[in-house]
C-alpha cells in the first residue's frame, strides 16, 4: 500500500517555555493580586487563570479585573523567583518578572491602564458553607486562540486586581503563561 503525496514534516521545534505563577492569602481591600511583567525581548502570552475565592465571614461576589498596563512597570509587591515557575526545568527562566501583591502592595504609580482586558467574576463563600469552587479561565479556548499577549518591554504588564469588596482568607490565584 502506498501513500503517495503524503509527507509528514519532522521538526525539531519545541513548544515555547511555559510557566505558572501563583499567589495566595487574604484579600480584604482593593489589591493588585498579581502582576506579570513582560521581558525586554520576548512576548508573554497568558494562557489560563485559575481562581479559588477562599472563605470569608460573609458571602460576597466580586469581580477580578485583568488590566493591561503600559508606560511604567508596576513596583512593590513580593518578587517571584523566576526559576520556580518553570514547567520544564530544562527551559530557560522567565525573562520578565512576576510580583505577588497580597502580602506586600503592588504599586502602579505612573502606570497607564490602557483598558481592562477582561472582567472575571469570583465568589467568596462564608466559612459556614465552605470553600468557593475553583474556577478556571482558559484564555486560549482549548488551544483555538493564542491567549492574551503582553508585548515585549518591562513597561508592559498585566495585573489581576481585586476591586475592593470584602475578600476571603485562603484566596488563591494561579496564572499559566508562556513567552516567545
Image: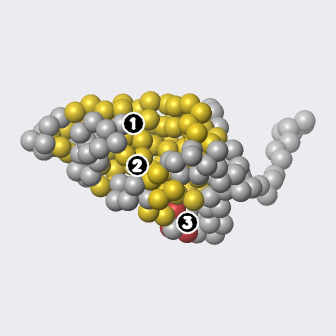
Instruction: Give left or right: position of 172 versus 126.
Output: right
Q: Residue furthest front?
A: 110
Q: Earlier in the sequence, mark 1 or mark 2?
A: 2
Percent x, y for residue 161? 42, 41
Q: Element type at marker 1?
A: strand
Q: Residue furthest right?
A: 5
Percent x, y for residue 106? 45, 53
Q: Element type at marker 3?
A: helix
The image quadrant that residue 47 belongs to is top right
Instruction: Give left or right: position of 75 versus 171.
Output: right
Q: Earlier in the sequence, mark 3 or mark 2?
A: 2
Q: Which mark is residue 133?
A: none
**From this viewpoint, is residue 91 visible?**
no
Q: What is the crowding at mark 3: few (fewer than 14 residues within 10 Å), some, or many (at least 20)?
A: some
Residue in front for this viewpoint, 178 or 9: 178
What residue appears at the point 66 percent right and 66 percent down from the top-left corner?
Answer: 92
Q: Element type at marker 2?
A: strand
The image quadrant that residue 127 belongs to is top left
Location of mark 3 (residue): 82
Q: Earlier in the sequence, mark 3 or mark 1?
A: 1
Residue in front for this viewpoint, 6 or 98: 98
Q: Which mark is residue 64?
A: 1
Q: Are marks 1 and 2 in contact (CB under 8 Å)?
A: yes
In space, the residues marked 1 and 2 are separated at their CA atoms by: 9 Å
Give the foreground label among 3 and 2: 2
Location of mark 2 (residue): 33
In space, the residues marked 3 and 2 are separated at their CA atoms by: 17 Å
Percent x, y for residue 179? 66, 52
Amino acid at each position: 500500500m502506498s501513500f503517495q503525496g503524503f509527507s509528514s514534516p519532522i521538526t525539531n521545534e519545541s513548544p515555547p517555555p511555559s510557566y505558572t505563577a501563583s499567589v495566595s492569602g487574604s484579600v480584604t481591600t482593593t489589591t493588585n493580586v498579581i502582576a506579570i511583567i513582560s521581558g525586554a525581548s520576548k512576548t508573554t502570552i497568558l494562557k489560563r487563570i485559575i481562581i479559588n475565592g477562599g472563605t470569608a465571614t460573609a458571602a460576597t461576589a466580586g469581580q477580578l479585573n485583568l488590566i493591561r498596563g503600559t508606560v511604567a512597570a508596576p513596583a512593590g509587591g513580593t518578587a517571584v523567583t523566576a526559576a520556580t515557575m518553570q514547567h520544564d526545568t530544562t527551559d530557560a527562566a522567565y525573562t520578565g518578572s512576576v510580583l505577588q501583591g497580597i502580602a506586600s502592595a503592588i504599586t502602579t504609580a505612573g502606570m497607564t491602564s490602557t483598558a481592562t482586558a477582561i472582567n472575571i467574576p469570583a465568589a467568596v463563600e462564608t466559612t459556614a458553607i465552605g470553600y468557593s469552587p475553583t474556577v478556571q479561565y482558559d484564555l486560549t479556548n482549548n488551544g483555538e486562540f493564542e491567549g492574551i499577549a503582553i508585548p515585549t518591554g518591562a513597561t508592559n504588564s498585566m495585573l489581576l486586581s481585586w476591586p475592593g469588596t470584602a475578600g476571603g482568607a485562603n484566596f488563591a490565584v494561579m496564572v499559566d503563561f508562556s513567552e516567545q
